[in-house]
Amino acid sequence: MQETAVPSAPPTPPVSLAALLSRDDLGLRQITGPPAGEVTIHGAHTSEMSDPYPYLLGGELLLTAGVHIPEAAGRPGSFDFDGYVARIVAAGGAALGFGVAPVHDTVPAGLVAACEEHGLPLVEVPPRTTFSGVARAVWQLMARARLSELRRITEAQQGLAAAASRPDPVPSVLRRLAGRLEGRAVLYGPEGAEIAAAGREPGDEVRRALAELARFVTGHPSSTATDTVAGTRLAAYALGPGRGFVLGVAAPHRESGDHTIASVAAVLLSLLTGEHQSGTGAARSSALVRLLLGARREEVAPLLGGGEGDGAVTRWYVVHARPDTGAPDAVSASALGAALGSPLVDAADDVVRVLVPAPPQAEGGGGVRERDGGVRPEGDGSVRPEAGAAAPRKPPAGSGPAGSGPAAQPGWTLGVSAPVAPAEWPAADAQAARALARARATRSALVRHAERPGFADLVPPGEAEAHARALLAPIGGVPALAETLRAWLSLHGSWDRTAVALSVHRNTVRQRIARCAALLGADLDDPDVRMELWFALRHLRG
């Protein structure tokens, strides 16, 4: 059952009775009751009332000198010790401290028996120790506990914030939270399915109860709910109103500050799982429907939004990305899209594809043309096009220089196409794929594809394609051979880098290149042959 009642004890950091008994200056001694290490105290209160119930909040160490107990209480039936202790227990009292002197020389035996019967810790306070001294010691211990709690929360906040800035933010936040709470942290999606999880796997009963608690908060106004199942503390936190994402936490115990730490994680996950939209969802849905019904890409592109100001986006980048570690998940892919400034993300297999609107500066080609025919971005020029050298592994923060397109992102390897019109999206997709393969082969953060003028542009495209098909006909029936030859030539004949780009063994690359040379009847060590084959591969379609 979900817990809705407020706790009976005050919301202050509790202290262990054992810590109070360890104070040599107090000289306290436990007479009976459960082990002091299992008893927590939320405060100290002095009362000489025969019924202290109305004056207790719960969790207190009740101090009394037994003024209300007759001196003849040692005789049977002279005082109702059982009723007195029962009222303390009913009020939630944590322990009873009995002061020896000036009223009683010893702790009454009837009181000892009653405390033992009800399981209430009974502590003897020596004559030299004042009740105010005991109360001050309790508050000192609570102050230290509060300071320790704040330090723990601060360290947890810093750790969670650092985890949220990692390339895999959601799994990192969940791992850090599960480690802090020594339990299990789960992110549930809008449909109630586990999207990501970290920490020790609980039993089936606990797992089902946590999933049920997550569904509970999505269907009720309350954004949090708690429960206890099989001795495990459960908590669920709704991540934003009406979005359906829920953080579930299962921990074997609950310490002061755990709720605050879990709440910080919930806030971070709310931001990480939020929809980063640069256009309305309705417009994108309309664009999808029109595409499915046969509309052309250039007709639906304006519905995708993403432009700055009032101007419509006329050109787009296609970005292919792979995480440096692990496989991409839906949430990390969404976070990458947000970093690139686009909600148009497709996470399939090991590659994330993002359609990014080109800024106005890139509409006309972007960048400054060099004397050798290359293109470099305006600004620091830290990232060069695919046809030139690869980018150094120092990704700039935020967006790239004006007109340079998407910037490198920490923890990701990116391949970026040239800015193209919607009708050319399929070609740009192929450009981005080749750029990503080159980036992985050269261990670069980002590689851009950029068209540059050359002698090949002097040949009409139709004639160039016909020549390419004729020249490459011997290997045309084996796509793997053409693709391997393209990658090998683009990487200047490097066996190792080609193997990395194609995700195959280097011996496979050698065998395929040797097969190409045999089928084509060409000497691939001849630079003129390589140049002609590269020309043909560039103009080969399909």
Image: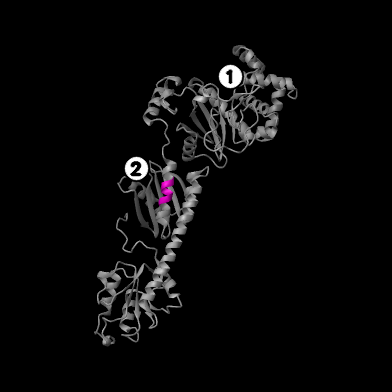
Q: Which residues are magenta?
A: 263-268
| Residue 332 x/y as whole percent | 49, 40
Please name the residue that numbered disc 2 is placed on: 241
Location of residue 143 (image quadrant) = bottom left
| Residue 74 x/y as whole percent | 29, 86
Q: What residue lies at 59% left-to-right and 36% top-to-bottom?
A: 445
Please name the residue that numbered disc 1 is placed on: 541
| Residue 283 x/y as whole percent | 38, 27
* Nearer to the camera, 515 or 419: 419
* Nearer to the camera, 18 or 175: 18
Check the image and report above or below for 48 versus 280.
below
Check the image and report above or below for 428 versus 382.
above
Q: Nearer the viewer, mark 1 or mark 2?
A: 2
Check the image and report above or below for 64 versus 398.
below
Q: What residue lies at 68% left-to-right and 35% top-to-bottom?
A: 496
Between the C-alphas of marks 1 and 2, the distance is: 49 Å
Residue 265 located within the stretch drawn in magenta:
yes
Seen in the image, is 194 located left or right of residue 446?
left
